[in-house]
Amino acid sequence: MSRLVVRPLRQADLAAADRVFRVAFGTFIGVDEPEKLHGDAEHVRSRFRAAPDAAFVATRDSEVVGSVFVADWGSVGLIGPLTVRPDCWDQGIAHRLLDPATSLLAARGTRLAGLFTFAESPKHLGLYQRYGFWPRDLTALVEVPVPAPAGPVAYRLLSELDPAGCEAAITAARGLTGAVYPGLDLSREIRSVLVQGLGDTVLVDDASGGLHGLAVCHIGPGSEAGSGLAYVKFAAVRPGAGAGRAFERLIDACHELAAHRRARVLQVGVNLGRRRAYEALRRRGFRPQRLGVAMHRPNEPGYDTPSRYVLDDWR
């Protein structure tokens, strides 16, 4: 009988893990050519390079049959994507992959663990509930065509700062996200986008020059967006007075960056528990393309509250 082995993912596993990722999701959602799902977008390689110490692979007879990734956002830890080759579904492999992933979160002292999964799938919900995750609000993946820039928008790009300015901006970003949720820290995502050349991080300042909003953007082929697309992986504005106006400015800045990089469509994810952010996007013409559900461990809101102007989708 063949033996299943779960171990840390290695560089040599990436091509096989990428194929399993595309075929698994493509088969589940029913696309004609599952292996071509997401085109020239990259999810497996970019996430491995961002955190090679937080990726695991399942092999059988030395063949990759599944993988899972863990993202470190400070006090928040995310699991996913978790994928298993379709001919190996319902054989307990997802459980075997979740064991090291959840153990890693526990070892890091993660305050809030989360993931995104198919809201319509009892099998997926049941799997994660066995590990203490609880389904909460729906998350909408929304998009809008990118118009030509309407006029200048005041913002900075992390890639245009000198090394000292870059470090100061990342420190300021940590303070902003910590105000959104204690310990929330996007430093790894910000550095990964910069180092890998996946896109850029938009910085919007307030009248006194303090950081008021940020958006970590993937743009074009090789990123999590793909050709012709700009994808906001995470965005937030500082809570409190003026947050709604700052959010509008931040979205304007993302639009302008997308237009300058020749993206045709701007995509974002937003949890529907963040009602004001979702309503602001709808007023600006964003329309849902897909729905999933956010699952939390423990079963608490985290930063999915009406007053939080935050964009992400935890895929």
Image (tube, rainbow, N blue to C red):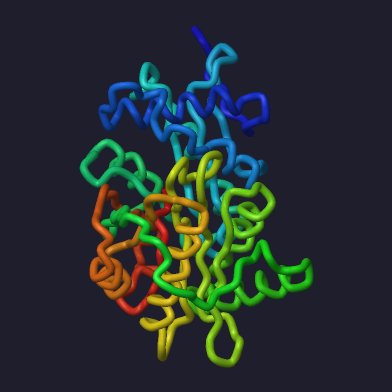
Of 277 and 255, which appears nearest the observer? Answer: 255
Of 201 and 147, which appears nearest the observer? Answer: 147
Q: Quadrant of residue 284?
A: bottom left
Left or right: where 216 falls relative to 191? left
- The relative height of residue 130 versus residue 287 in the rendered view (above or below) is above
- The relative height of residue 287 versus residue 228 in the rendered view (above or below) is below
Q: Residue at x 39, y 50 (%)?
A: 264
List the single residue furthest toward the top: 1
Q: Residue at x 26, y 27 (%)?
A: 30
x then y, percent, for residue 105: 55, 52
Q: Residue at x 57, y 28 (%)?
A: 6
State whether residue 273 appears in this view. Answer: no
State whether residue 291 appears in this view. Answer: yes
x then y, percent, for residue 250: 45, 73
Q: Quadrant of residue 93?
A: top left
- The relative height of residue 123 versus residue 288 in the rendered view (above or below) is above
- The number of callouts visible is 0
x then y, percent, for residue 148: 40, 61
Q: Residue at x 61, y 44 (%)?
A: 54
x then y, percent, for residue 77: 52, 56
Left or right: where 105 falls relative to 256? right
Of 293 and 210, which appears nearest the observer? Answer: 210
